[in-house]
Image (tube, rainbow, N blue to C red):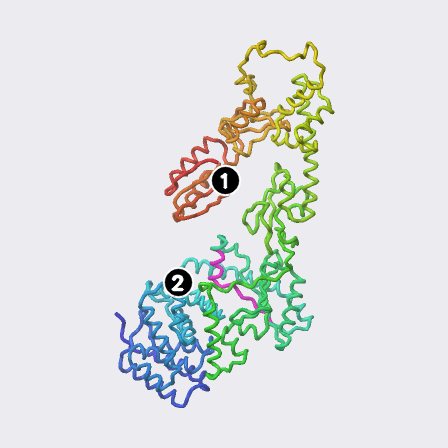
Amino acid sequence: MTEKLDFTNTEREQAKALYTELKDKIATSLEKEDNTRLLHTLMQAIEQGEINRDAFGLNPIVNSLQTALLVVEEIGLKRDAVIAVMLRPCVEAGCITIDEAASQYGLSVARILNGLQRIQELYKKNPIIESENFRNLLLSFAEDMRVILIMIADRVNLMRQIRDNDNETARHDVSIEAAYLYAPLAHKLGLYKLKSELEDLSLKYLEHDAYYHIKDKLNATKKTRDAYIERFIKPIEEKLTAAGLKFHMKGRTKSIHSIWQKMKKQKCAFEGVYDLFAIRIIIDCPLEKEKQSCWQTFAIITDMYTSNPKRMRDWLSVPKSNGYESLHITVLGPEQKWVEVQIRTERMDEVAERGVAAHWRYKGVSGGEGGMDEWLTGIRQMLESSSDNLDAMAQFKMDLEPQEVYVFTPRGDLLKFTKGATVLDMAYHIHSKVGNQCTGARINGKVVSFRQELQNGDQVEILTATNQRPRQEWLNIVKTSRAKSKIRLALKETQQKEALLVKEMLERKFKNRKIEQDESTMMRVIKKLGYKEASDFYRDIAEGVLDSATVIDKYVELQQGDRTITGDNIARSAEEFVFEDNANANIPQNDDVLIIGQDLRGLDYQLAHCCNPIYGDDVFGFVTTGGGIKIHRQDCPNAPEMRRRFGYRIVRAKWSGKGSSQYSITLRVIGNDDLGIVNNLTSIISKDEKLVLRSINIDSFDGLFRGNLVVMINDNTRLESLIKKLRTVKGVKQVERI
């Protein structure tokens, strides 16, 4: 039950001071009888006792005076809006009707009061504030756009007053509305000061711990920030002064809400947010020299510090629809820290601080009520043209040369590439060896493949592996001629090495079968098998496309065709031969076993990437064309085909000793997309000192999640134990090794 209004002595003094301040600020726009009528209406409402305190126990008349002062100082509204705000509690209490307000104060005041009343009725229907439809409905109810501006100011004032209030439910509701409705509207109108205050206060009431955590961190690091700002701006001040520019500079710390949003988006701690503050350079110059002075300042700063083109915002050439003009750049300052610098003039700074009010005033609309219609029409057009679901306008994209893209190395060096260039292009730009061993990159902290196209402003760290080799298809991935030529050279060198190895391997096989090898006959074999170049022939043997047994059979066929028929090589009847069972001829019958882990001199073996065997798995060896041996699991998906086609290259293998090395394995996990399930999975791994989680990749769709965990592990016994533990996590449906 709401409490009847009974002015306390403090409230009386507060109301009297606020009314006097308001009267002085709008004195030039007031009509002769306004002051007398207003005082009479307000006193009558107080004496009748029809006005109730709100859900927070606040005094509506004091609140209305505070809101009226806000719309004057922060937005620039005058008489009609101020009177409407002051009369609002009286209209809601029934002390004065809208028709009576129209006759006493004019139709403009009545129109504003009608809009405020309709919105109040709309709220009683408990709409979903976060929906876009509510915003559209709100605008349709507010025929006069001053109603929207008053609602924003009213919400700011209310959020200020409820700081220590005990009504948690009501405070939560108004904070939700402030965050999802009024803050975005304030942003759209360029009321950045009010927008930031709404966001910070909403965070304070909705996520108390996060708000004070960031606030305490900001307070603790203030001295360090101030010292860094001083070091950063000192050389800039000297250069700008030497250039003859009149200016002043100030640092602006990012709002607590903005820092929290960035922490959540980047999934990092407070220390991971690098742009906690911005430096603002405000230039004092005539209107006709504004752009010239701003761009001159831009040139001086970018000559001193490397800029990030991806984070440049040119609202100087093309201002925002709400009138905001400024030049934003992010540069790499001392100690390799990124710093945002905002360049603007005194006029632009006032527009940025005061939003629509200052913008229309500078466009020539007078401060009185006479020019208000033009101003308000502009505001309505601005709001109604928005179809972005209350999101801030998309930032104006930098107009770089269409054929160029700029990226940063981890050290902050800026590299330029042709548009469409990939990670592989950058790797070869750094060094041929880096390119040849490139497996991917970490772009802005996220791991990507070497096929990924580079974007303006990316910070790129190339990833390599010693067992990586260039391949023919890489020529289709790179865009720069430099990378293409280096790949061709590397492929040529690789092919030459492989050709020598394949030749040696063929010679051994020919000797094993007691066949004399002739170079001219071999060239005929190459032609008969459809190859124009010997290099292609040897490459296909090395890659397993062509079987060496096929080559030898073709060689024998051509060689036999060249011989003269004698008693030794006359064709015989099949009846003269006895059938031999060769079904198991491709399985090695010797008892030699490759012992993995022992010091095998002169024998090169590697673990196959197709099945990633680890200590304890049942394995076998496969002799490659290069002479080395690849270790595969017995259940490797490629095992059946290898046994069928290349049985003579299969070697028995087993592990020796105990598992001392760590092996990389990938687990696929599928389950319900429940809150905290990823935390539960990773905590199981982190509790085991002998397990290392290398990466985790989770995708969520339609209530389910599917992800891959890459883990470093000693042996398959520990692996089986880990799989069992992961399967016990609530919500996990499937865990399998891939």
Relative image position of residue 432 (x, y in whole percent): 68, 43
Relative image position of residue 661 (x, y in whole percent): 54, 32
> Nearer the observer, disc 1 or disc 2?
2
> Which residue lies most toward the right here?
520
Is 455 drawn above or below residue 376 in the view shown?
above
* Label 1 Cα crowd, 10 Å radius (few <14 / some 14-19 / many 20+): some
Q: Nearer the viewer, residue 244 or 216?
A: 244
Q: Is residue 414 left or right of residue 4?
A: right
Relative image position of residue 470 (x, y in whole percent): 64, 39
Residue 17 shows in this picture: no
- Look at mark 1 in the image and give the residue it sits on: 710
Q: Earlier in the sequence, mark 1 or mark 2?
A: 2
Is 614 drawn above or below residue 98 in the view shown?
above
Q: Quadrant of residue 145?
A: bottom left
Q: Is 366 contained in the magenta span?
A: no
Q: Nearer the viewer, residue 646 or 162?
A: 646
Where's the N terminus, which quadrant?
bottom left
* Label 2 Cα crowd, 10 Å radius (few <14 / some 14-19 / many 20+): few
| Bounds of the magenta segment | 248-263
Q: Residue at x 38, y 45 (%)?
A: 672
The type of residue carrying mark 2 is Ser
Q: Residue at x 69, y 47 (%)?
A: 482
Q: Secondary structure at mark 1?
A: strand
Q: Quadrant of residue 428?
A: top right
- Look at mark 2 in the image and give the residue it sits on: 131
Q: Secondary structure at mark 2?
A: loop
Q: Residue at x 69, y 20 (%)?
A: 559
> Which residue lies most toward the bottom here?
32
